[in-house]
Image (cartoon, grey):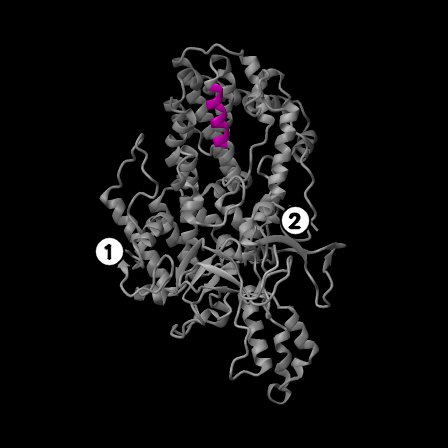
Amino acid sequence: MVETRTVVAVSAASAAIAIAGYIVYFDYKRRNDPEFRKKLRKEKKKAAKNAKEVETETPPVPGRSPEELKELLAKIGAEPLPTLPAEREKYFMEHVGIGEQMLLRGPAFEVPAALAFYRALRAYPAPMEIIVIFQNTLPPQIFALVMQLTSLDVELEGDSEAEAETKADNMSEPEVVSAAQSEPGAESPPEIVPEPGTKDSTEAQDLSYAEVAGKAAESEPEPTPAQGSEPPVPESHQEPAPEPESTGPRDPAAVPLGSDSDDDTRSDVHSETDSYHQTKQRAEGYYDVFPPKNMNVKIVNVPVKDKSGKPAESDGKPILRSALVSAKEIKAGDVIYMEKAIVAVLDFDLQNLRTHCTHCLRRVDVPISVPDDPLDASYCSKECQTVSKIHSQNVLFGLDPPVPPNPDEPEKPKSEAELVERRKSQEEFVEILRKAGATRALLVARFIASMVAEQSAKLGAAINPSSKNSSPADLFGLPEPEGDPAAYSFYDHVERLKYLEILETPIELEEVNALKKVMRNAMEGLEEFVGDRYPLLKGKLAYNVIGVAFGSGRDDKPPVTVRPEDIERTRTPHGTSRQTGSAFYRVSSYLAHSCTPNVAPSFHTGTSDLHLVANEDIPEGTELTMAYVDVNQGPTETRLEARRRRRQELARGWRFACECPRCLKEVEEGILNEDKNTEGNDAAKEENLELGPEAKLEDAVRRYETG
């Protein structure tokens, strides 16, 4: 017998992967955009109408009465849905699995099975899509019951709205106004907006993407904490969020499988308590399972220190930050861990020359070229070519379908005109990248495409657990949390990283619009992620990307033609001007800067594989630090000039004034008074660095910081 979960998963493959890239966008819009919520309600009513039609065509199913079903629906309605995209996806697959197990128990469990499938339907972003899939995969009587539940749910909503309208009709105007203002979730009264050009208008225009998103979130009440809704505890001084209140008991169908007792006699309260503790444990336990222990490091919260070396405080609480520390004693010269890049790109001058592998960045004498590739991709081996295509190259610069074909529901092939349009958008995007000589946009694009590939791999693993080839760990070779590999999504690892605010410029807008076209022509809907999350994701890459330099780096990079503050900088002790390319890493992104680093990234294998090497003996529990810039004194530099250069690069690239032991010791030694005769009053200018907005954490992460 083919498992229902497998059939549903296979049937839903195309739809599920298609929304993987912009599921974060869906979640954000659902919570913050009233018009988007109206659209969802309309789609739900459309689904209910479809359910009514199915009910008239399908014989009634023996089971519980409509009144009993309404009671069960009320309980389900009290269960908050997960808000994190990865948890919503996991919730969907779990309840499909529960429904499958209930079906195997026989006719007596058809109602619990239908309730499980209905829960899965609630979590799916596009109800009509999953209804069609259920219609083709579920037994007719189960599908009819799911449709009956959908119809009853809409009726209950309609009854609630009618009751509210009747109550409002009997209220006086002041009572109506008071009730509207006190109602949780009610929209705020319209504000008086200043005319364009006034101070308030200017301030609104200057808001960053993150600040705008934060204000949008503040306009609505906080969603009820649910499974997956608590982000993990990161670094700073924010007050811990209050514990979520206990929700109503769950329906028996949601009780974990394996119990011998009857559904109606199970302890709903116990089940809900277990769910809450699992949610809390997941939120707070991320750094207990990541990084994996075999990497010999762990991430902990450490206090931020002020210039005097004392712990900094805010409102009487210590300010904390996430730090990568050694999990054991390490000797000088030891390789602490090896880490593969999430995504990597060559500097554009090398990409155009085709002298290095587009995927692993290895230098090649006889490259494997890809005909008609807009990026002029070349590879050192067939393996790199295949992996690159699976990860991102095909989505961004290929013409094959971006989602593996579903033999049960074959997709209509793209027309010649559609393929021509897809290729044209790719060529336009590459032209913009080459004109700017920038690589961050390509890193963002590769990350989004890789996220889709990872979701596809997870789905494959869910469908066929015995297939090792379909697991995300095998596909990417990235460090994964210990335990359940599906517990955290591709984006979960990035969400916890700091970011720089990215200002919109004409070049930036041109870049974004071009990438949107590429994504839309590759996969309908994927461009939405580019629109809302692009600045934030690009800001994370700007802060965390590491420069890949082989040996001591190259000396043939073309000179920059932009202002020093506009240079794309990466973390590399050799300096960005000597790198071969840029790469983004899950664990190494947590390395802090120091002008006297105790570790250094090494790329001695000639690829983007990062080997973290100890510069000195490191005791267990010591924070690991690398140099983000070249901290050595050049042959023509004075000590003060070398200090000024490195600190200016840090301020321009990462927007902080370094206060590492070396920088503080130099001040104590009177370095600012050196070269007084030649420097004059300029000697102290470097202490007044223009830092700009400092690196930030996402609001969703900050909300659960401790300190």
- The answer to whether residue 690 is seen in the rendering is no
In the image, 348: left or right of 287?
left
- Which three-letter amino acid code belongs to the residue tagged 1? Pro
Side (left or right) of 701 relative to 140: right
Inter-mark Cα distance, 2 to 1: 50 Å
- Residue 37, position as x, y percentages in the image: 51, 35
Which of the 4 image quadrants contains residue 320?
bottom right
First of labels 2, 1 by sequence position: 1
Name the residue furthest bottom: 677
- The residue under label 2 is which amino acid type? Glu
Towards the viewer: 545 or 222: 545
Q: Is residue 19 visible?
A: yes
Residue 641 coordinates in the image, percent (x, y)? 57, 80
Disc number placed over residue 104 in the picture, else none: none
Quadrant of the frame with the N terminus:
top left
Q: Is residue 707 magenta?
A: no
| Identity of the residue furthest to the left in this view | 416
Segment colored magenta: 92-103
* Res. 371 mark: 1
> Judging from the image, what secondary structure is the residue with disc 2 in?
loop
In the image, residue 100 lies in the stretch drawn in magenta: yes
Quarter residue 20 falls in: top left
Q: Position of residue 680 (x, y in %)?
A: 63, 86
**Above-or-below relation of 138 to 683:** above
What residue would you read off at disc 2? 705
Relative to 433, is 245 above or below?
above
Q: Residue at x 42, y 72 (%)?
A: 560
In the image, 668 versus 249, the foreground residue is 668
Label 1 residue SS: loop
